[in-house]
Image (tube, rainbow, N blue to C red):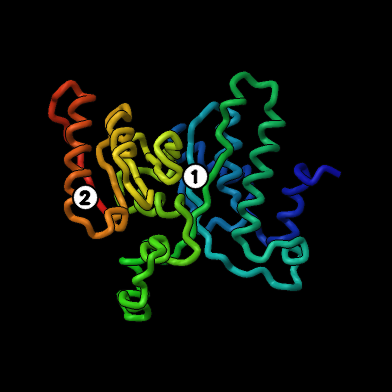
């Protein structure tokens, strides 16, 4: 038995009253446009996401969905828990994965179906990854003098962070960029340098060299903002100023001497 094709049946075992895909799809047809963003604050098993993908496959729409769900634990006696799902969010994520693949299979002969977007990103509410602004320091749970470490990551970021988490957090703090903005790793510059929305460079390198600066200046189109780690300059004000001057000179050089508008910030 193909579990992808039986997941709808399983959902009915996991939930007493799951929302019908057909009903949600009908409501979308009535109240949403082909490029609407659909928000469901009580996502449950992610029926709304399923319906959005289904309708996009049928009419070629480009609707997007945002599903919000508390990580409500599954009862240990429930069928969902026995199947390995510890909370409702896990069920929803798996539902979206399987539904997307199932829809693509159902419409495999339809022209352009390969362009159907069935991808999604998962975010959870948590404290900041950036240590200097974390609640632990604000409330005195961590004393700054206890963290004067040569390990810059331990100094700058909270335990369990990843570079991509930091980049997403910075993007979210800007408020001007949607969660679907592209994030790209700029491996030709360094192993810890990224750009999001083709607009903001986030350089998490522990040391900013002239080579790193020169390569950032070569990026096309020119970034609107470049963000460095303050610790990358080791409290050397002269080094920081020289780096900023070099970036400015190199940007003008690659812009044929013209003034360009950009900002530099530090974390």
The numbered disc on residue 23 is none
Name the residue tied to disc 1.
Answer: 65
Q: Secondary structure at mark 2?
A: helix
Mark 2 burial class by Cα count in 10 Å: few <14, some 14-19, many 20+: some
Q: Quadrant of residue 59?
A: top right
- Marks counted in the figure total 2
Q: Is residue 95 left or right of residue 52?
A: right
Which numbered disc, 2 or 1, marks the residue closer to the eye? 2
| 23 sits left or right of 66 in the view | right
Q: Is residue 110 visible to the viewer in this orientation of the structure?
A: yes
Q: Residue furthest bottom?
A: 140
Would you say 51 lies left or right of 232 here? right
User: Residue 105 at x, y = what percent?
Assistant: 71, 31
Above or below residue 109? Residue 78 is below
Distance, label 2 to label 1, CA atoms, is: 46 Å
The residue closer to the viewer here, 9 or 264, is 264
Query: Image height check: is 141 above or below 80?
Result: below
Can residue 37 be seen here? no
Q: Which residue appears farthest toward the right when viewing the image?
A: 1
| Direction from residue 43 to residue 6 in the image, left or right | right
- Mark earlier in primary sequence (2, 1): 1
Q: Residue at x 39, y 37 (%)?
A: 189
Q: Vertically, is 156 above or below 64?
A: below
The circle on residue 239 is 2
């Amino acid at each position: 038995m193909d579990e992808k094709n039986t997941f709808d049946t399983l959902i009915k075992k996991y939930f007493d009253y799951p929302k019908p895909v057909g009903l949600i799809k009908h409501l979308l047809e009535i109240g949403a446009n082909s490029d609407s963003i659909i928000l469901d604050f009580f996502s449950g098993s992610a029926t709304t996401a399923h319906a959005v993908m289904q309708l996009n496959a049928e009419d070629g729409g480009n609707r997007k969905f945002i599903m919000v769900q508390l990580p409500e634990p599954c009862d240990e006696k429930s069928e969902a828990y026995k199947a390995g799902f510890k909370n409702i969010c896990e069920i929803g994520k798996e539902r979206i994965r399987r539904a997307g693949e199932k829809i693509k299979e159902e419409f495999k002969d339809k022209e352009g179906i390969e362009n159907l977007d069935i991808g999604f990103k998962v975010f959870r509410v948590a404290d900041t990854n950036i240590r200097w602004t974390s609640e632990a320091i604000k409330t005195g749970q961590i004393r700054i003098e206890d963290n004067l470490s040569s390990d810059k990551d331990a100094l700058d970021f909270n335990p369990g962070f990843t570079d991509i988490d930091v980049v997403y957090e910075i993007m979210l703090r800007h408020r001007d960029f949607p969660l679907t903005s592209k994030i790209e790793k700029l491996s030709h510059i360094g192993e810890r340098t990224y750009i999001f929305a083709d607009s903001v460079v986030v350089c998490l390198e522990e040391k900013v060299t002239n080579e790193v600066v020169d390569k950032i200046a070569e990026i096309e189109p020119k970034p609107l903002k470049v963000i460095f780690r303050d610790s990358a300059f080791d409290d050397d004000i002269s080094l920081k100023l020289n780096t900023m001057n070099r970036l400015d000179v190199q940007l003008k050089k690659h812009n044929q001497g013209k003034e360009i508008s950009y900002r530099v910030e530090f974390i």
